[in-house]
Amino acid sequence: MTNKIRTAILGMGVMGKRRRDAISRHGGFELVGTCDVVPGYDFTDWKECIDKTNPDAVFVCTINSVIPDIVCYAIEQGIHVFSEKPPGRNLADTLRMEDAYNTGNSILKFGFNHRYHNSIIEAKTLINSKLLGGVVCVRGIYGKAGNVDFTKEWRNNPELSGGGILLDQGIHMLDLMCWFLGDLTVEHGNVDRLVWRNMPTEDSAFAVLKTQDGKIASLHSSAIQWKHKFDMDIIFTDGYIALNGLLTGTRSYGEERITYYHKDLEIKDGKLGNPLEHTLCFDSDNSWDYETAEFFDAVRNGKPLVNGTIADAKRVMTLVESIYEQSR
Ligand SMILES: NC(=O)c1ccc[n+]([C@@H]2O[C@H](COP(=O)([O-])OP(=O)(O)OC[C@H]3O[C@@H](n4cnc5c(N)ncnc54)[C@H](O)[C@@H]3O)[C@@H](O)[C@H]2O)c1
């Protein structure tokens, strides 16, 4: 008898294939079914795929609008669920999944994979160590290049996606900000169509957020960067971290690196502001594997989930909704 987690993948686009590769590398999963509305997979109907293969777990990698129906149905069948972000198109979708989760007995994990990037893991470790003092503010920029068919993508059809660049990419940055700073509320939020003016979704999002004890985060999420960009600055009472670049399959966000320094207020050689800097560069993206391993350990070994919980999903979707709300 196999002790592997019998798994179906629903939605076999870019992420479905990426998850298929990750569960194959892990070795603890047995792929029992694949499904996509486009032909070429075991099933074209996700419900049929679940009913016929009766998996222990599903990976939900469809477009955003389909995610809540699959997640709720799978949980009702007692199946464990790994779902891509965003957790639905809006907070109402997330709350629907929360209800299903609360009445069921399944593990439910969402794919906020940025937490597993090596530079992010280093940053979180430095924050927890208090080596640089306490964090006081964070500023993040996440930018996309766009492409010729950008306005026609499902990501920019609000019926299918729920929103634009904020929900697509900004959500990852917001999740990291919450992870680094704690619970945030939106002080100021604005989304706009600065260039793709006829697109129904925003190409730019700006937000200033605050924790109850006064820590501040600022976000700029952009689909008009015309080049991929990921930058985050973390300012501490006694130092600083810069996160630059993010290793992805295409390597289009540049080399992934973390630079940090402790403040040095002394004048040296007549110069001020010249602290000793430490930089680490990473040449592999292990995020998908770490994330898969955490899901496996929760399902098979009963380990509590740390990342991508329903509480994380609700927290970040509350922020997203609030930013949209302030723009209306
Ligand atoms: N964690 C990350 O960093 C990350 C990165 C990219 C995308 N995503 C998320 O992953 C999801 C998929 O994104 P993608 O980039 O793979 O998009 P994609 O367009 O490449 O794939 C989506 C797939 O879902 C299929 N699909 C649509 N409706 C379906 C249905 N009813 N049943 C079965 N399949 C259906 C489509 O045919 C398509 O193949 C999205 O929710 C997206 O936000 C997460």
Image (cartoon, grey):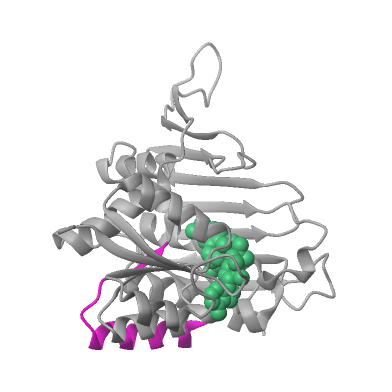
Q: Is residue 63 visible?
A: no
Q: Is residue 176 above or below residue 62?
A: above
Q: How many marks?
A: 0
Tell me residue 135's x, y (percent). 38, 49
Residue visible at 84% across and 75% down in the picture: 198
Q: Is residue 144 above or below residue 82?
A: above
Q: Does residue 96 belong to the magenta stretch?
A: yes
Spot the residue most to the top.
269
Residue visible at 57% across and 45% down in the picture: 231
The residue lying toward the viewer, choosing from 29 and 96, is 29
Residue visible at 36% across and 44% down in the picture: 25
138 left or right of 123 in image = right
Q: Is residue 63 above or below residue 148?
A: below
Tell me residue 52's x, y (percent). 37, 79
Magenta part of the chain: 89-111
The residue lying toward the viewer, choosing from 260 and 6, is 6
324 left or right of 261 in image = right
- Quadrant where the C terminus sits is bottom right
Image quadrant assignment for residue 129: top left
Image quadrant assignment for residue 191: bottom right
Ligand 1, what quadrant?
bottom right
Tell me residue 161's x, y (percent). 61, 76
The residue lying toward the viewer, choosing from 267 and 73, is 73
217 left or right of 188 in image = left
Residue visible at 24% across and 88% down in the picture: 103
- Quadrant where the N terminus sits is bottom left
The residue lying toward the viewer, choosing from 163 and 130, is 163
275 left or right of 161 in image = left
Q: Does residue 54 belong to the magenta stretch?
A: no
Q: Is residue 39 visible?
A: yes
